[in-house]
Amino acid sequence: MFEINIITLAIIEFFLLILIFFISKFSKKSWIKESLFNFKIKCKKPLLTIVLPSILSLILVLIYSFVFKKIEAYPASLWLLIITAVIIAPLTEEIFLRGILLGYVVKMSEYTQTKIGKIIFIGIGFIIQLALFVFLHQRLEWQNLSILIVSGALYSSLFLIYKKNLLPSIIAHSATNLFVILFSLL
């Protein structure tokens, strides 16, 4: 199976973040900004935007550790895990998968004529970006697969519930990764 080590992945994700920034800042085409960058990153209510997603992530990791009795982080030094898994990866994955991909699907669903068509359209986008999220993590054992599916669905749901605001899903993603790292140290 194709494997990328955590350092290579962090470098790739870091350059993708830089690319996203430059495309969003310097793109002269308005359709790019309107269709691909139609998400927001805002904190209007800190309790709902930061604390609630963090608590949901903690509950998710506690349930996971209770059911499977073992939590394992990627094998790497602690500082590298913190930088990549708690900062870079959640930002990149949430911007690409939830912000751009799912945000684009939500934007395009506005052009459907019926409510059921809109729900089906968003549902298909939800499943596609969730499958990409699971695939990108390359940890396809049953235990890891289950937490990836549940956590990916949580992040996507937060993005949709908070009306295309990425901050709750970024916070939840970062918190989940941080809790997994901390629990794996116990």
Image (spheres, rainbow, N blue to C red):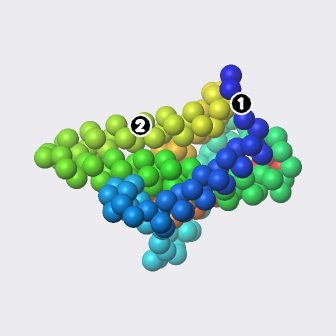
Residue 165 seen in the figure: no
Percent x, y of residue 83: 75, 57
Residue carrying label 1: 3
Q: Residue at x 67, y 59 (%)?
A: 87
Identify the residue at the far front of this view: 28
| Amino acid identity at mark 1 | Glu
| Label 2 Cα neighbours within 10 Å, binned few <14 / some 14-19 / many ≥20 | some
Disc 2 target residue: 127
Closer to the chain start, of discs 1 and 2, is 1
Please state which of residues 171 and 56 is positioned toward the viewer in this rendering.
171
Q: Check the image and name the residue furthest to the right.
A: 77
User: Relative to 126, is 178 above or below?
Assistant: below
Tell me, for residue 126, which label it has, or none. none
**Which residue appears farthest toward the top when viewing the image?**
1
Q: Quadrant of the N terminus?
A: top right
Task: Determine the image quadrant of residue 143.
Answer: top right
Give whichever of 178, 1 is nearer the camera.
1
Seen in the picture, residue 146 relative to 12 is either above or below; the reply is above
> x, y percentage for residue 47?
52, 73
Name the secondary structure under disc 1.
loop
Farthest left residue?
113
Q: Is residue 185 visible?
A: yes
The image shows residue 137 at horizontal and vertical percentages of: 63, 37
Residue type marked 2: Ile
